[in-house]
Image (cartoon, coloured by chain):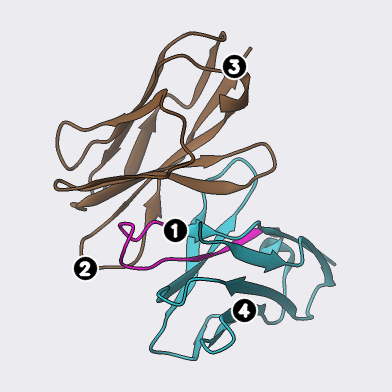
Amino acid sequence: ETAVFQTPNYHVTQVGNEVSFNCKQTLGHDTMYWYKQDSKKLLKIMFSYNNKQLIVNETVPRRFSPQSSDKAHLNLRIKSVEPEDSAVYLCASRRLGDYEQYFGPGTRLTVL
Amino acid sequence: GEQVEQLPSILRVQEGSSASINCTYENSASNYFPWYKQEPGENPKLIIDIRSNMERKQTQGLIVLLDKKAKRFSLHITDTQPGDSAMYFCAASERQGGRALIFGTGTTVSVSP
């Protein structure tokens, strides 16, 4: 099956902990993204990444960082979570030269 | 940064009627405008898109219009069905920024029988 996969589905943690979310795409795409969807359903870009370039949304706090081992994987690490980080984190991918982005199922983070 | 305004935030329609959602964007370099449908607990799914070299696109009961001069685009759902009830997001992207999608604030569409 070709798609965008994310793990875990859900994660509950305490303020100050470090968390890491995984994203893998088997679509052969070259560019991957992380989006945050908050409790009001607002969707905001966090990172865009291909092999050559990482683009960071200037509003993303420094405790967030993307990590990539190859073009099929883009993980998201949060160094010290805060309550406002509670959200659904959506990974997406796109083939270079195409326009369409395909989303994974998301990881719901709850920070207590 | 770039903003995409989306209205209305809530739209209630009767089954069989049309539903229209409007979006405006700021960045004149934006050249790709997708629409996503998101059902509760699911991820957003692309339902239709339009590029800046077109003014109109239609597929399976969906029509998208683009007015580049006014920086406005819209989604029209014809002959709505209960299965069209969901949240809809418009978005815009440009080549710079890695084609990241800038999303509108979403419209909750509710189709009643």
Q: Which residue is mark 3?
A: A111
Q: Which residue is mark 4?
A: B74
Q: What's the mark number on residue B101?
A: 1
Mark 1 residue element: loop
Residues tagged 2 and 1 counted as in contact (Cβ below 8 A):
no
Q: Closest to the observer: A59 or A25?
A: A59
Question: Circle 2 sits in a helix, a strand or a loop, which is it?
Answer: loop
- Chain B color in figure: cyan
Residue occupying the point 60% across, 60% down: B104
Label 2: how many Cα within 10 Å (few below 14, some 14–19, many 20+) = few
The image quarter in which residue B3 lies: bottom right
Residue B76 x, y percent position in the rendering: 65, 80
Q: Mark 1 — on which chain does it sit?
A: B
User: Share a chain, discs 4 and 1?
Assistant: yes
* C-alpha span from label 4 to label 1: 16 Å
Instruction: Estimate the x, y position of residue B86 in percent, counting from the top left.
Output: 68, 57
